[in-house]
């Protein structure tokens, strides 16, 4: 190794230091001067470890400087991005505010323009509107006059029609009220003549439906009176008329098997004159034997007599008459005619007791059934329809003359 090689290495290191950190060149020069190696002699070569350490130090310093520079550049880059984002956001906000203000300004301008246009149109249309209003007012007054004349004519026509209907007697209200009067009269007859509450209830319900169809407030009291009568009719006891009729029908089929009163089993013992009997112990043995045999024979034989025979024709006639009376009772029960039912029951009982043996089970069953029917037909307090007729008269409607003359009352 020559003397030029150490000097060459020294000059290269100095140039690197000056290029990397110019501000620290003086310090590096002083450091190099302090650490300057003794110039080698021509005879002794420079040590290799000192050069290697110097190179490592220089590399470390260069790496540190490069890292610091890179960190500084990254920081300034991030800061620049944040500043840019903030500026962009402010610019966007200011743009939106500018757009909003522009829209408000445009709206104000448009409203002002529309207001001016409307004012111009109002000024143009006001005279026309006033002219049309005056024309319409005149036409309306003319139409009112015509309508008043038409109403007067209609009133005269209605009056004439009402007079014609009144003369002809075909007023719808009068016809409907006549129907109601008819139904109420039938209900009264069913109550107090036929003693039929169910039939009367049906007639009253039909009359109430016709009054409801009229829809007149004057008829409300009459409908209230009808409602009261319906409640009273519904509360009456229910009679099993169908059951009674079926039982009578079954009993009527057994009539041919009933024993007649003339054929009733009556055992009539022969009446003999009392005779004085001697005690068997006091008689001789042969007389005692005869006496005992006669007493035993009398106890074994019973003689009866029945000389009242009935012919077949008479029996058929009696049974036919009995069935006819049973049919009469059935019809009266089904017809809900309490008075006729009682009369038929009395006649049937008298006939059966006079012709048949009353102690027979079948005959006794009929008599017991007749007694049950009479017990069920106890007189109940039936409602009165006078309140309904009075309410209809107080309504002051064109009622039929028969309804005004009707006084109601209880039939017997």
Image: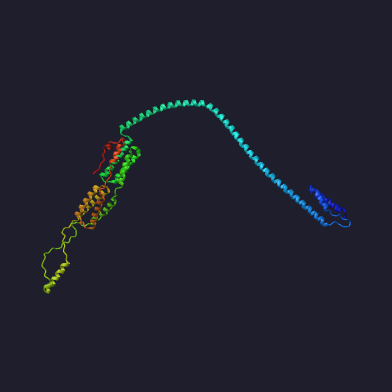
Q: Which one is nearer the viewer's eye here, 407 or 32? A: 32
Q: Residue furthest right?
A: 42
- Image coordinates of residue 122 in percent, x first then y, are 53, 28
Q: Which residue is drawn at 67% across and 44% down?
A: 82
Q: Which one is nearer the viewer's eye here, 201 or 251? A: 201
Image quadrant holding the N terminus, namely: bottom right
Against 295, residue 25 (above or below) is above
Please indicate, yes or no, whether residue 313 appears anywhere in the rendered image. no
Q: Which residue is drawn at 15% across and 68% down?
A: 297
- Image coordinates of residue 54 in percent, x first then y, are 80, 54
- Judged left or right of residue 56, residue 180 is left
- Image coordinates of residue 396 in percent, x first then y, are 31, 35
Res. 353 image quadrant: bottom left
- Judged left or right of residue 351, residue 95 is right
- Judged left or right of residue 314, residue 232 is right
Q: Which one is nearer the viewer's eye here, 77 or 297? A: 77
Against 154, residue 296 (above or below) is below
- Image coordinates of residue 282 in percent, x first then y, are 11, 73
Q: Residue at x 69, y 45 (%)?
A: 79
Please indicate, yes or no, whether residue 26 appears anywhere in the rendered image. yes
Res. 37 image quadrant: bottom right
């Amino acid at each position: 190794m020559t003397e030029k090689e150490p000097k060459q290495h020294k000059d290269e290191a100095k140039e690197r230091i000056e290029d990397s950190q110019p501000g620290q060149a003086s310090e590096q020069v002083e450091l190099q001067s302090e650490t300057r190696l003794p110039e080698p002699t021509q005879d002794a070569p420079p040590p290799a470890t000192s050069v290697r350490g110097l190179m490592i130090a220089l590399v470390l310093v260069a790496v540190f400087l490069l890292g610091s520079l890179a960190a500084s550049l990254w920081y300034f880059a991030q800061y620049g991005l944040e500043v840019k984002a903030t500026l962009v956001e402010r610019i966007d906000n200011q743009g939106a505010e500018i757009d909003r203000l522009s829209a408000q300004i445009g709206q104000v301008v448009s409203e002002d323009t529309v207001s001016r246009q409307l004012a111009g149109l109002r000024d143009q249309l006001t005279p026309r509107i006033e002219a049309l209003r005056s024309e319409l007012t005149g036409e309306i007054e003319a139409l009112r006059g015509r309508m008043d004349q038409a109403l007067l004519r209609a009133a005269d026509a209605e009056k004439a029609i009402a007079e014609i209907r009144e003369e002809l007697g075909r007023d719808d209200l009068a016809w409907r009220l006549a129907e109601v009067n008819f139904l109420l009269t039938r209900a009264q007859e069913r109550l107090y003549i036929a003693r039929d509450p169910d039939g009367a209830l049906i007639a009253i319900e039909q009359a109430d439906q016709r009054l409801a169809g009229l829809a007149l407030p004057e008829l409300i009291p009459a409908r209230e009176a009808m409602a009261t009568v319906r409640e009273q009719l519904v509360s009456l006891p229910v009679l099993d008329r169908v059951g009674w009729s079926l039982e009578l029908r079954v009993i009527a089929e057994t009539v041919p098997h009933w024993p007649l009163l003339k054929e009733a089993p009556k055992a009539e013992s022969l009446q003999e004159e009392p005779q004085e009997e001697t005690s068997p112990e006091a008689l001789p043995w042969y007389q005692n034997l005869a006496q005992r045999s006669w007493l035993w024979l009398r106890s074994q034989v019973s003689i009866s007599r029945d000389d009242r025979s009935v012919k077949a024709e008479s029996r058929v006639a009696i049974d036919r008459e009995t069935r006819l009376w049973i049919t009469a009772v059935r019809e009266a029960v089904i017809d809900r005619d309490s008075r006729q039912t009682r009369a038929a029951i009395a006649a049937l009982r008298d006939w059966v007791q006079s012709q048949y043996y009353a102690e027979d089970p079948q005959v006794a069953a009929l008599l017991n059934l007749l007694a049950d029917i009479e017990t069920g037909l106890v007189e109940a307090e039936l409602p009165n329809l006078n309140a309904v007729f009075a309410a209809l008269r107080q309504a002051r409607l064109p009622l039929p003359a028969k309804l005004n003359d009707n006084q109601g009352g209880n039939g017997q």
